[in-house]
Amino acid sequence: MQESSLHASIKTWFTQDVNQQEVYIDGFLIDAVCKDLLVEIQTRSFYQLKAKLSTLLKNYKVRVAHPIAAEKWIIYLPANGDESIRRRKSPKHGRYEHLFRELVYISQLVFDPNFSIEILLTHEEEIRRDDGLGSWRRKGWSIIDRRLIEVTDQVILSSVSDYQMFLPENLPQPFTTRNLSLSLHIPHSLAQKMAYCLRSMDIISISDKRGRENLYITRCE
């Protein structure tokens, strides 16, 4: 699959001081090497990284860099040609909690002392083309590229305790995933993924049930 402009720009962002991009280590192509740290840039599914990370972590420090678009502008291109038809700002705003959409696939790796995640909040452009081959949700428009405008904020998660930052202070004890959803103003489906990951990290645990809903308590202070 062709590398997106977003992926390439973040790779350059990581190696602006030391230019080591696309280095083969133990048979794997690594996006960036920063001194003794291997950086894998993953804009989409973490599931694809699971086997690669499990092997590399035995001998190397590995960081997954994951960009999340806090602000996004959509550029529409005609079926033929590269002159934009229009540009609009997306009403969707990415936030740190959106990491859990992907972390569910590799949540157990956070226990490895060689593993870390860096979330990059970005401003970016999404390029769509009117080629009739895209999703019906986009009325046939295909996403052909993503472009980085700037990195606006970042956070590094290098130990299990770092993930406690995601639990809001006003969360009742015990709590349900619906309480978590309301406290953070996120969709319930995302709150469920968060609860799954935080439970696998032993940050929260199930204390009881209320009907069909699990009741959770915070284990780490």
Image: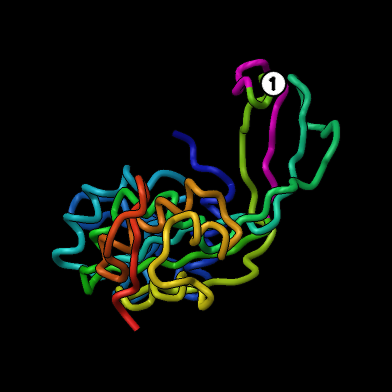
Of 38 and 216, the residue lying toward us? 216
The structure residue drawn at horizontal position 38% and vertical position 61%, both measured from the top left corner, is 64
Of 192 and 131, the residue lying toward us? 192
Magenta stretch contains residue 139? no
- Position of 89 relative to 116 (above/below): above
Of 168 and 42, the residue lying toward us? 168
| Whole-percent x, y for residue 91 in the image | 74, 48
Of 172 and 126, the residue lying toward us? 172
Point out the image quarter for the C terminus. Answer: bottom left
* Residue identifier under label 1: 139
The structure residue drawn at horizontal position 41% and vertical position 72%, both measured from the top left corner, is 173
Coloring applied to the structure: rainbow
Q: Which region shows up in magenta?
A: 124-136
Left or right for 25, reference 75: left
- Give the SS element for disc 1: loop
Q: Residues within 10 Å of mark 1 (few under 14, many from 20)?
A: few
Q: Give the residue furthest to the left.
A: 58
The structure residue drawn at horizontal position 46% and vertical position 70%, both measured from the top left corner, is 166
Q: Give the residue furthest to the front.
A: 211
Left or right for 99, reference 148: left
Q: Give the residue furthest to the bottom.
A: 221
Which amino acid is tagged 1? Answer: Lys
| Whole-percent x, y for residue 120 in the image | 54, 64
Point out the image quarter for the N terminus. Answer: top left
| Whole-percent x, y for residue 159 in the image | 31, 76
Q: Give the residue furthest to the top.
A: 132
Quadrant in the rendering for residue 54: bottom left
Q: How many marks?
A: 1
The structure residue drawn at horizontal position 15% and vertical position 67%, both measured from the top left corner, is 59
| Whole-percent x, y for residue 220 in the image | 31, 79
Magenta stretch contains residue 133? yes
